[in-house]
Image (cartoon, helix red, strand yellow):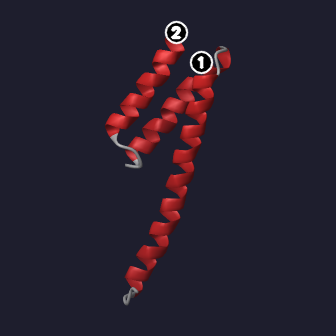
């Protein structure tokens, strides 16, 4: 267990940040799933918002930059076809 006051605070703040990141990552996964399964114009309208969400995850280092690029590519490929 942590002995220093600052270490205890780091544990608390890390937990809060981790929960927020997990929520955002799950939200992006669900949005991707919905957009990829939706064949109508609704999926195309959601695409810019999903790409923005993916970029935010990449910026926060929740996902790797190559994974972000792969997800965006997959989304755009589906949008164009």
- Name the outermost residue toward the bottom: 3
**Tag nearer the camera, 2 or 1:** 2
Would you identify the image quadrant in which residue 41 lies?
A: top right
Disc 2/disc 1 C-alpha distance (Å): 11 Å
Query: Which disc, if any, is residue 44?
Result: 1
Residue 40 located left or right of residue 19:
right
- Name the outermost residue toward the left: 66
Quadrant containing the N terminus in the rendered view: bottom left
Please name the residue that numbered disc 2 is placed on.
81
Would you identify the image quadrant in which residue 56 lies?
A: top left
Residue 75 located left or right of residue 36:
left
Which residue is nearer to you in this view: 34 or 17?
A: 34
Which residue does the image show at 52% across and 9% down from the upper left?
81
- Mark found first going from the N terminus, 2 or 1: 1
Label 2 neighbour load within 10 Å: few <14, some 14-19, many 20+ = few
Whether the residues at callouts 2 and 1 have beta carbons within 8 Å, the answer is no
Find residue 2 and report its horizontal and vertical position in percent: 39, 86
Mark 2 secondary-structure assignment: loop
Q: Looking at the image, is 70 positioned above or below residue 76?
A: below
Find residue 45 and report its horizontal and vertical position in percent: 62, 20
Q: Looking at the image, is 27 positioned above or below residue 36?
A: below
């Amino acid at each position: 267990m942590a002995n220093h006051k600052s270490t205890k605070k780091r544990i608390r703040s890390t937990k809060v940040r981790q929960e927020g990141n997990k929520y955002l990552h799950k939200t992006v996964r669900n949005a991707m799933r919905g957009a990829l399964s939706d064949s109508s114009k609704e999926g195309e309208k959601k695409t810019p918002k999903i790409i923005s969400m993916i970029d935010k995850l990449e910026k926060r280092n929740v996902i790797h930059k190559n994974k972000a690029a792969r997800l965006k590519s997959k989304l755009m490929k589906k949008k164009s076809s």
